[in-house]
Amino acid sequence: MADFPILQSLGYILFTAAAAVLLLRLVRVPTIVAYMAAGLLLGPVTGVVGVTHTIELISEIGVALLLFLVGLQLSLSSVKGVVRTVAISGTVEVVSMFALGTAIGLLLGFDPAAAAVVGFGATCSSTVVIVKLLGQRREMKSLHGRISIGICMVQDVTTVIALTLFAGLGSAGEADASIGGAMTMAFGGMFALIGLAALASKFVLPRLFSSVQRSQETVFIWSLAWCFLFIVIAERVGLSVELGAFIAGLGLAQLRFAEQLRRR
């Protein structure tokens, strides 16, 4: 009989995740936090599940789909009327948290580049968790709900810029190319992807999805195909697969049936 250790690892992962959700829902902890707790328990805490190539591949796909979902939540119509408030508060939040995170990194003895990574990490919050909490409380369309989502959009845009920056620096290091040329390629690829998503969401995707909107399964499959198309393009132009998935979700978020896709 063939030996498939991944099946045993998946069994541990799914059982622990289900148990964590069951226990933490008693204190109304979002499911995504329960999944993270299960991962920490199985990995760094107990070492029951080791980090293999297959586990890394599954986690890479999971993070890409998570960012696809984050992009799918960011409909521009959700922040109409609060753009000024969102722009000011979001910018202040990002700048202040970046400065605080970088300062903490320097105090801990990190070099400036590593401290800047800590600073970028400090600027981020989980859009998925916030959207889920607002949805559970039926406050998505409230004033504070729209402002919260808008600030998350500012943070996510900052994350996109950071991912592109790191991708450019990584390309410069691997190919021994100039940093300026690598950064130009990275940001050029990012803006090209955003432009492609914007044009498609206006001229192509509405007609394409309208023709199959009666079949939820087909809409779901086409959405995943759209996501992985951008993942492939992003990888080909030297960007991260997470960035490609995020931009793909952002393009679909502007469609009138984006809420249906989010539920699926």
Image (cartoon, rainbow, N blue to C red):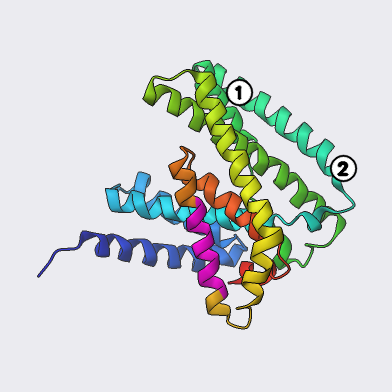
- Helix or strand or loop: what does disc 2 sit on? helix
Position in image of residue 244 (x %, y %): 53, 48
Picture layout, residue 50 above or below residue 186: below
Looking at the image, tell me whether mark 1 or mark 2 is earlier in sequence order.
2
Residue at horizontal 78 percent and vertical 32 percent from the top: 92
State the separation of the CA atoms marked 1 and 2.
26 Å
- Helix or strand or loop: what does disc 1 sit on? helix
Position in image of residue 36 (x %, y %): 48, 53
Q: Main secondary structure of the magenta part?
A: helix
Badge 1: few (under 14), some or many (20 or more) residues near its Cα, within 10 Å?
A: many
Find residue 3 and report its image quarter: bottom left
Q: Which mark is residue 85?
A: 2
Q: Please indicate, yes or no, whether residue 49 appears anywhere in the rendered image.
A: no
Q: Please indicate, yes or no, whether residue 157 appears anywhere in the rendered image.
A: yes
The answer to whether marks 1 and 2 mark residues whose Cβ atoms lie closer than 8 Å is: no
Q: Is residue 103 magenta?
A: no
Is the C terminus in the top left, top right, bottom left or bottom right quadrant? bottom right
Is the N terminus in the top left, top right, bottom left or bottom right quadrant? bottom left
Horizontal side, residue 177 vs residue 66: left or right: left
Horizontal side, residue 32 vs residue 49: left or right: right
Q: Which residue is farthest bottom?
A: 214
Q: Is residue 229 magenta?
A: yes
- Report the residue marked by disc 1: 102
Query: Which of 185/257 is in front?
Result: 185
Residue at horizontal 62 percent and vertical 83 percent from the top: 214
Badge 2: few (under 14), some or many (20 or more) residues near its Cα, within 10 Å?
A: some
Residue stretch rendered in magenta on the structure: 219-230
Query: Which of 226/148 is in front?
Result: 226
Find residue 24 and report its image quarter: bottom right
Kind of residue at disc 1: Thr
Query: Which of 249/40 is in front?
Result: 249
Position in image of residue 206 (x %, y %): 68, 67
